[in-house]
Amino acid sequence: MIAESAGPDSAVSKLIADNRARFDQAMSEGVGYLDAQSGDEVGGVVAGIIRHRAGGEIGVVNRGTLEAAFQEVVRPGPITRGDVHLVIMTLRGDQVRSLYQRSERVQGQVGELFFAGVERRGAILVVNGRPLLNGEEYRVVASDFLAGGGDGHGEFRTGRHAKNL
């Protein structure tokens, strides 16, 4: 039974305060700088930043995450770890292709994705200069929202070796 008259434990309070300070410091660490102006530029820039910082082959962000993060107004400036909650996972080429093609169909709408490391060259998709192969596995970095299948992108839910960053 815990006595109602028990006051706060100073050692526990100090431990919480110290850990909160370390957490706040870690979340304010810069991961990149945004100087792009249009929404499409921002999407590609942010996807590139998360891809680079997490060591993925492909970076993906969705339009809704960008709008929420920047409160529907694109503001140049620093991007911190606290601004984005990321997951790195392995997706097969056919899953990446499905995501990319669906995103092409919904440009400018909910569900649109912005990619870094993947581009269309004519009729083929290329990952970092090489043709995307359906059976090959790729390290993909995305928001935790997308990793959970958000905006109807269920391919992310089946990603292997998923790890929160």
Image: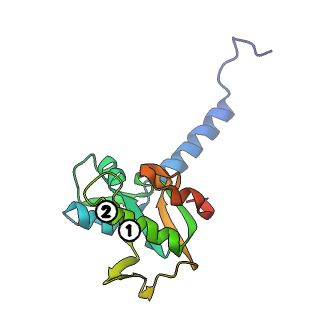
Q: Residue furthest right?
A: 1
As rendered, which of 65 and 77 lies closer to the eye? 65
Where's the C terminus, which quadrant?
Answer: bottom right
Quarter where residue 3 is shown: top right
Q: Is residue 90 left or right of residue 105?
A: right
Q: SS class of the residue under badge 2? A: helix
Looking at the rendered structure, which numbered label has been put on residue 92? none
As rendered, which of 6 and 158 lies closer to the eye? 158
Looking at the rendered structure, which numbered label has been put on residue 105? 2
Give the x, y percent position of residue 87.
53, 59
Q: Is residue 160 left or right of residue 118?
A: right
Q: Amino acid at mark 2?
A: Arg
Q: Is residue 103 left or right of residue 72?
A: right
Q: SS class of the residue under badge 1? A: helix
Quarter where residue 75 is shown: bottom left
Label 1 – label 2 distance at C-alpha = 7 Å
Q: Is residue 41 left or right of residue 25?
A: left
Q: What residue is rendered at 58% in x and 78% in y?
A: 135
Q: Residues within 10 Å of mark 2 (few under 14, many from 20)?
A: few
Q: Residue furthest left?
A: 37
* Contact (Cβ within 8 Å) of mark 1 with mark 2: yes
Q: What residue is rendered at 32% in x and 55% in y?
A: 63
Give the x, y percent position of residue 32.
36, 66
Q: Amino acid at mark 1?
A: Gln
Q: How is the image coloured?
A: rainbow
Residue 80 visible somewhere in the drawing: yes
Give the x, y percent position of residue 119.
35, 78
Q: Residues within 10 Å of mark 1 (few under 14, many from 20)?
A: some
Q: What residue is rendered at 38% in x and 73% in y?
A: 116
Where's the N terminus, which quadrant?
Answer: top right
Give the x, y percent position of residue 10.
65, 30
Please name the residue that numbered disc 1 is placed on: 101
